[in-house]
Image (cartoon, rainbow, N blue to C red):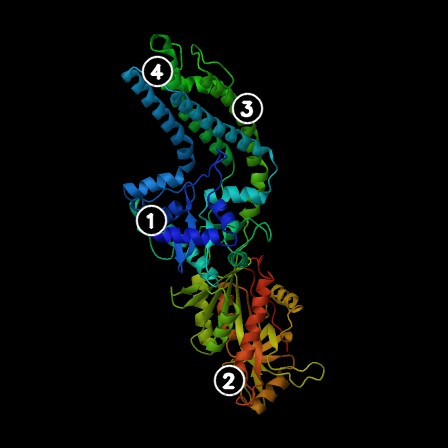
Amino acid sequence: MSSADCRAAVRAIRAAEFGAEAVRVARPRSVLGIVSSRGPLAVMLRVADAEGRLVRSGTTGVALLERPRFARLPPQARGGVGLRLLRLVDRRWDLLVFAVPPVLLLTAAAVMVLLTVVRGTRPSYAIVGLAIAAVVWVSVFMTAHVVTGSRMFAARTKDELAAESLPGFNWSMPLAHAGTGDEARLLRLAADRMEQLVEHHARRSARDSGWEPGEGGQVREVLVCLTRGATTASMRRVVAERLHLPYGPDSRVALRRPIGPVTAYREPVKAGGGFFLLWIGGVAVIVAVLAVFVADVEQQACGGAACAERPSTYATAVQWLAWHIVWQSAPGITAATWQTQVFGWLLGVVGLTTVAVTWVSAKLAISKHDEMLDDLKFLPSTRVLLMTVTDTERDAVLRTVPALTGRSFTGAVTTYDLGTIGATTLRLVQCPRQGSSAAQHTATEAIRQWRPDLVIMVGYCYGLREDWTREPQQLGDVIVATSIYDLDPRIEHEDRTEYIGPRPTTMSAIVSRFQAASTDWHRAAVRFGPLLSAQTLIDSSERRDALKREFSRALGGEMEGHGLYAAAAEANVPWILVKAVSDWGVDRRQHHRPAEAAANAADFVAHAVALGAFDDWPARQETTGPTDSR
């Protein structure tokens, strides 16, 4: 990414609707209080691009990824001297802003003193001005440090704690800016890049340890997105729709779960004391910088022989300052200058604040912080596999669920990654042809590859009840199968046909959730009842009438349901069929509306998922109930 590209991206970000807020999220305040903990945004983007953490989409669309604090940068990504210097500016910006100006001021004062001695002239007031400026600079930062620590006493919600803590222990996305219509794509690219970086690092680490990584590994990392780091309302809306908001609609964090078939994922947070460690680190930096200044002013004041009991060396200055943090005088060391006395007094205030910070940090680690961990420990994640047969059914699902994020070509079948709605992650698989055998093979392979918690077959079927007097069926009505009747296994007698196939029932918990979703979905009627399933395509009034007489409760029929049932029962995965009426099993040339029916079925399933019908779905339950009767 060139400097011009960085500047253009920064201008676009700052000019966005929530650009200023997003930049503050990406560059939070450090423990020193009045300076950001990260470098200028352009530097952040350059470093992230060099390390592979910057995701670009379009001309100015960018998403910034951050590694967990404990994750080491791979050696191949460290780069040359230029990149290392930029990384230093990015990661140590607060230290540089705090330390460099007073060091330069003191250096300039020392040079002026040296020139005065060499030339034999009177000392200039500029020397005093430089020294005072250095003292004021450091004093301002120390005061801000104390004020920042005092904010620990303010009550904070678990949401605020999560926004502070989670990005330190997880991969995170603190900044996202996309053009109109490109938001979902940017979010997908960011998630994909995170998984690529994690997988690449894991494989390299395994090889370095003498282990040859094999195929089939899954990324278990949770991506933490800071919602206020999105620069536009549309980007924030996409994040809220696609990801899990653990603290409600206005949550400061949104979590993207692993979409692969993982049995668990890496613990999102380690408990306790994060701010305390940052605070102690800030105090150590202050002491280290002040020691340089104290040693210099004391050396100039004492003038050689009288310096034995003064903090006139770096070591004695550090010792003197450390004792004043705990409100004690350093044994055998006495300061003479007013500047050193001021710093000692300020460090005493820092010591008092440190006691309070220690107590509050411990309290947070034990109580609220642990409560936040409990909220995230059982992060809900349901994997739902949608299954279609015809291109019309597939296209209806892809149009209805606009969160299409990619395709997986791994294994024997191709699956479409439809993204996440609420706490439900969706994938779509299409059978290569009609019939139960193809459905069984496709379902078996897709279940083996992705290990879903629930399989829903979505599509169209023929109806059998258009002649009901009370509520006759209409083309486009949705049928949720409470059971399926397998018509293929049968015995042909002289005077009748005996159907001996299984009649598995759908789990009542699945049916009840679809019933609840149907109360506020009004695109078409939703009916619940048995579906017939046979590999024979019905387009005969005689055959259709015979089925109506034989199966008086059946609402319709299709061709693939018992194949899905066989595969799902073998894998112990819950299943259901949701299909809409496209024809009546007769006169298909005149009364056949597959596109409308497929669209209705897909829309109803998407509606149920969007309502959260399966967000808390328990994995791996019993797949079938008792055999249904006619």
In the depicted structure, whether residue 115 falls above or below residue 450 = above
* Mark 4 residue element: loop
Q: Is there CB contact under 8 Å for labels 3 and 1?
A: no
Q: Position of residue 271 (x, y in %)?
A: 51, 38
In the depicted structure, whether residue 152 falls above or below residue 287 = below
Compute the Cα span from label 1 to label 4.
Answer: 52 Å
Q: Which mark is residue 297?
A: none
Give the residue at mark 1: 50
Give the residue at mark 2: 537
Residue at (42, 28) in percent of width and height? 285
* Mark 2 residue element: loop
Q: Disc count in the image?
A: 4
Q: Residues within 10 Å of mark 4 (few under 14, many from 20)?
A: few
Residue at (56, 67) in percent of width and height? 606
Compute the Cα span from label 3 to label 1.
Answer: 43 Å
Q: Which mark is residue 352?
A: 3
Mark 1 vs mark 4: in front: 4
Label whose residue precedes the other's in the sequence (3 or 4)? 4
Label 4 is placed on what type of residue? Arg
Q: Is there CB contact under 8 Å for labels 1 and 2?
A: no
Quadrant of the image occupied by residue 103: top left
Q: Is residue 125 visible?
A: yes
Give the residue at mark 4: 122
Label 1 is placed on what type of residue? Ala
Label 2 is placed on what type of residue? Leu
Q: Position of residue 316 (x, y in %)?
A: 39, 16
Q: Is residue 502 visible?
A: no
The quadrant of the rendering that contains the C terminus is bottom right
- Judging depth in this view, the residue of 627 and 179 nearest the camera is 179
Compute the Cα span from label 3 to label 4.
Answer: 42 Å
